[in-house]
């Protein structure tokens, strides 16, 4: 018996479904986001009989067949390159450079692989214009400007490309699904249709996804479950630096980030982010301390600034950019109660330079030192970095990857590293770098004044 199709309402922001229309989504709270959908049965629900099962001992891994994109930053985020049959979803704000990145890798990929670039947003002429600017001239790059998913799937079957790029999934449309492009049902069905074909033909597919106003990929959450990798392309609107962050990866570790800079010939890789983050910093001024954070397998140095000034009104202001406000309140409380530095009638501002967000406990100590340095007007010499977690009794606690952090400081020419005392045994001695272990915030600040 054929199932009756029924009308439901789905939120275009979070994908929540209900049988009633709401002005405000009961799940995510977005206004005016519920849209009518006709819920059809899954379009290509194929029923197979007699599936073959295999012993895992006889299955060969296909990890050797990774394609390199020619961009080391992207390869690292993907876990060492593109895996055949893998689905990679790239999300990010409009104009951040998703299309640019994907078109740019076509030049290197095109040397040995046939690429099908499907665009539902731009015309062939526009893509050609951009390709010229990026220096992409590969004979192996085939462009298809199309919104109809069935045509795209048919082209994949006839052209048999080695890599497919879909820009973007929200502009794709499956005829059988009776709702508009970009709706929850369309996006879900298009993603599963492309997934089935990609796995069957063993073709890796990049899918561009739009983001909603909260910065999450628009459409159903299920899309993120279907794909193998979810990457977010982020960046400050006012700076040309872009971070590619991985939040899900079936073929590698998450937490890896890739750093790029947008130039007039497309994206350039930034292989030395510490240099970029520290460039132009003022030397030997009070209220600044260099911190070291770990992103994936890589250590990065960044400058933390602290400003302390008398409060104009009764309530002192506490403001942090690039650092958690609650964590700042906690550090200030510890400094007052345990170390005897008083901020209660002072406005306190913390800023992490370079648009980076530091959420690691190891950043506590540099934040505290920047604030004390601002308070006492005492300069922290510019060849010093610090890291360590601050406990509620004012003690400095050990952090992970201590040696990696010291190595990065040494590479960047720093002469003195203030570390938690308990980390000292894990740190290798290096020529020209003095590593100082401290037990408390007070001790760390006294050390810095020497
Ligand atoms: P785009 O890749 O179109 O963004 P998305 O696909 O994520 O929406 O990014 C285009 C932006 O990048 C646009 O604002 C112009 C800028 N840009 C450059 O600065 N240099 C370049 O070489 C290119 C191609 C784009
Ligand atoms: Mg685009």
Image (tube, rainbow, N blue to C red):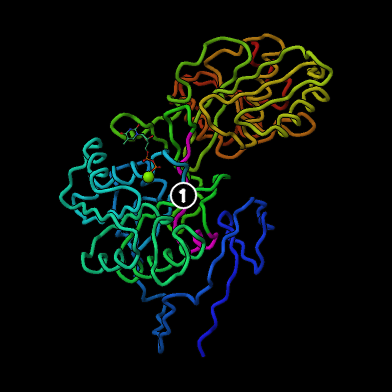
Q: Which residues are magenta?
A: 220-235
- Compared across the picture, whether 314 is left or right of 26 comes to right
Ligand 1 quadrant assignment: top left
Residue at the (18%, 47%) spot, across then down = 138
Residue at the (73%, 34%) spot, across then down = 326
Can you give x and y, in whole percent of width and height, for residue 327 in the image? Answer: 71, 33
The residue nearer to you, when weighing 144 against 200, is 144
Residue at the (52%, 57%) spot, across then down = 219
Image quadrant in which you'd find residue 144:
bottom left
Magenta stretch: residue 225 in it?
A: yes
- Compared across the picture, whether 119 is left or right of 239 comes to left
- Compared across the picture, whether 5 is left or right of 127 comes to right
The residue nearer to you, when weighing 114 against 278, is 114
Residue 191 lies, with reference to residue 397, above or below; the image says: below
Which residue has dot 1 on it?
210
Can you give x and y, in whole percent of width and height, for residue 110 in the image? Answer: 21, 50
The C terminus - image quarter: top right
- Compared across the picture, whether 193 is left or right of 69 comes to right
Can you give x and y, in whole percent of width and height, for residue 335 in the image? Answer: 77, 23
Residue 151 lies, with reference to residue 348, above or below; the image says: below
The residue nearer to you, when weighing 280 against 335, is 280
Image quadrant in which you'd find residue 23:
bottom right
Q: Secondary structure at mark 1?
A: loop
Magenta stretch: residue 40 in it?
A: no
The crowding category of the residue bearing disc 1, from other C-alpha atoms within 10 Å (few below 14, some 14 to 19, many at least 20), is many
Can you give x and y, in whole percent of width and height, for residue 216 in the image? Answer: 54, 49
């Amino acid at each position: 018996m054929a199932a009756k199709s029924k009308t439901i309402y789905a939120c275009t922001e979070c994908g929540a479904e209900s049988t009633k229309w709401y002005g405000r989504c009961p799940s995510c709270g977005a206004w005016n986001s519920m849209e009518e959908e006709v819920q059809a049965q899954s379009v290509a629900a194929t029923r197979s009989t007699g599936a073959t099962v295999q012993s895992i001992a006889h299955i060969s891994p296909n990890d050797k067949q990774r394609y390199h994109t020619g961009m080391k930053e992207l390869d690292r985020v993907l876990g060492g390159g593109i895996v055949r049959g893998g689905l990679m979803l790239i999300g990010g704000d409009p104009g951040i450079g998703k299309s640019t990145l994907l078109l740019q890798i076509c030049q290197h990929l095109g040397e040995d692989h046939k690429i099908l670039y499907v665009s539902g947003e731009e015309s062939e002429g526009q893509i050609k214009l951009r390709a010229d600017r990026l220096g992409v001239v590969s004979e192996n790059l085939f462009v298809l400007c199309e919104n109809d998913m069935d045509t795209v799937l048919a082209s994949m079957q006839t052209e048999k490309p080695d890599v497919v790029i879909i820009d973007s999934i929200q502009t794709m449309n499956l005829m059988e699904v009776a709702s508009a492009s970009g709706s929850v049902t369309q996006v879900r069905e298009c993603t599963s249709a492309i997934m089935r074909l990609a796995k069957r033909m063993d073709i890796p597919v990049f899918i561009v996804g739009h983001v909603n106003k909260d910065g999450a990929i628009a459409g159903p959450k299920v899309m993120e479950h279907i794909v193998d990798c979810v990457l977010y392309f982020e960046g400050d609107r006012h700076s040309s630096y872009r971070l590619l962050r991985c939040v899900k990866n079936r073929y590698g570790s998450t937490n890896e980030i890739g750093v790029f800079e947008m130039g007039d010939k497309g994206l350039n890789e930034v292989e030395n982010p510490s240099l970029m983050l520290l460039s132009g910093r003022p030397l030997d001024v009070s209220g600044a301390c260099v911190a070291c954070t770990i992103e994936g397998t890589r250590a990065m140095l960044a400058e933390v600034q602290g400003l302390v000034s008398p409060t104009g009104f009764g309530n002192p202001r506490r403001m942090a950019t690039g650092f958690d406000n609650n964590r700042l309140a906690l550090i200030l409380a510890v400094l007052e109660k345990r170390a005897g530095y008083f901020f209660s009638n002072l406005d306190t501002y913390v800023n992490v330079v370079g648009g980076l967000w530091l959420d690691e406990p190891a950043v506590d100590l540099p934040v505290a030192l920047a604030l004390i340095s601002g308070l006492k007007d005492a300069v922290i010499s510019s060849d010093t970095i610090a890291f360590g977690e601050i406990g509620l009794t004012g003690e400095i606690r050990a952090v992970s990857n201590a040696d990696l952090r010291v190595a990065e400081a040494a590479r960047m020419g720093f002469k003195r590293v203030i570390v938690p005392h308990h980390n000292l045994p894990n740190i290798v001695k290096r020529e020209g770098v003095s590593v100082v272990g401290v037990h408390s915030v007070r001790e760390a600040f006294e050390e810095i004044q020497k």
